[in-house]
Amino acid sequence: MEKENTELTHFNEAGRGRMVDVSEKDSTERVAIARGSISMEPETLRRIMEGQMKKGDVLGVAQIAGIMGVKQTSTLIPMCHNIFISGSDIAFEIDEANAKITIEATVKNTGKTGVEMEALTAVSVTALTIYDMCKAIDREMVISEICLMKKSGGKSGIFIRNKKLEEQK
């Protein structure tokens, strides 16, 4: 069951940023799934799919970069906790008709704080790596729609984006 929290917890009594103290929280299994996409010229997508980019296997390198991004989240986002990651995966959905690659990152851990930021970072770093590897032939690429799709675990329970749409399926 989803519980909405309207209190901002990353501020101390003086209104300055702080890292939230999670020492009293229970450890639970936590999973987060994030998505995003990168749109490009059809020729760029064709060359990625056929392995014709000079920098190498674009999706292979981007997948590894995304996983590395998961592990670096706490060094990039100031108030994120350095947490143990028990699993991480990146999947791609190729949309040839719209010359777009959708990226989905799944991150798991058992701990006192969630992995939403790690999943969002994974998608962002993956998309940026695709951009970097293809920018020589397509500077018009657009990274968009990065969002949390689902999260489970912890006190707030389960979140599903567009829950009504999911229930209709």
Image (cartoon, rainbow, N blue to C red):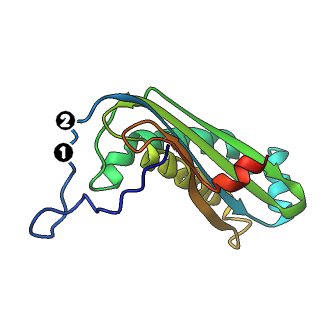
Counting every numbered tag in the picture gives 2
Residue visible at 72% across and 44% down? 92
- Farthest-out residue, right: 97
Q: Position of residue 31 (x, y in %)?
A: 50, 36
Above or below — where is 25 with respect to 44? Answer: above
Eye-nearest disc, 1 or 2 = 2
Which kind of residue does numbered mark 1 sit on?
A: Asp
Tell me the residue at 68%/40% (across/down): 91
**CA–CA distance in space, label 1 to label 2:** 8 Å
SS label for mark 1: loop
Q: Residue 24 carries which label?
A: 2
Q: Is mark 2 on a helix, strand or loop?
A: loop
Quadrant assignment, res 21: top left
Image-based side of 17 in relation to 83, left or right: left
Viewed as shown, does residue 48 lie left or right of 143?
Answer: right
Residue 60 is drawn in which quadrant?
A: top right
Q: Is residue 56 visible?
A: no
Q: Which of 83 and 112 is in front in this view?
A: 112
Proximity of marks 1 and 2: CB atoms separated by less than 8 Å: yes
Residue farthest to the left, as pictured = 14
- Side of 12 relative to 158 (left or right): left
Q: Residue 123 carries which label?
A: none
* Residue name at image x 85 percent, y 45 percent: 50
Residue receiving disc 1: 21
- Against 51, residue 11 (above or below) is below
Residue 167: % across, % down? 72, 47
Coordinates of residue 159 in the picture (x, y in percent): 53, 48
Left or right, 89 with reference to 50: left
Identify residue type, mark 2.
Answer: Glu
Badge 1 crowding class, 10 Å Cα cut-off, few under 14, some 14 to 19, many 20 or more, is few
Q: Is residue 90 visible?
A: yes
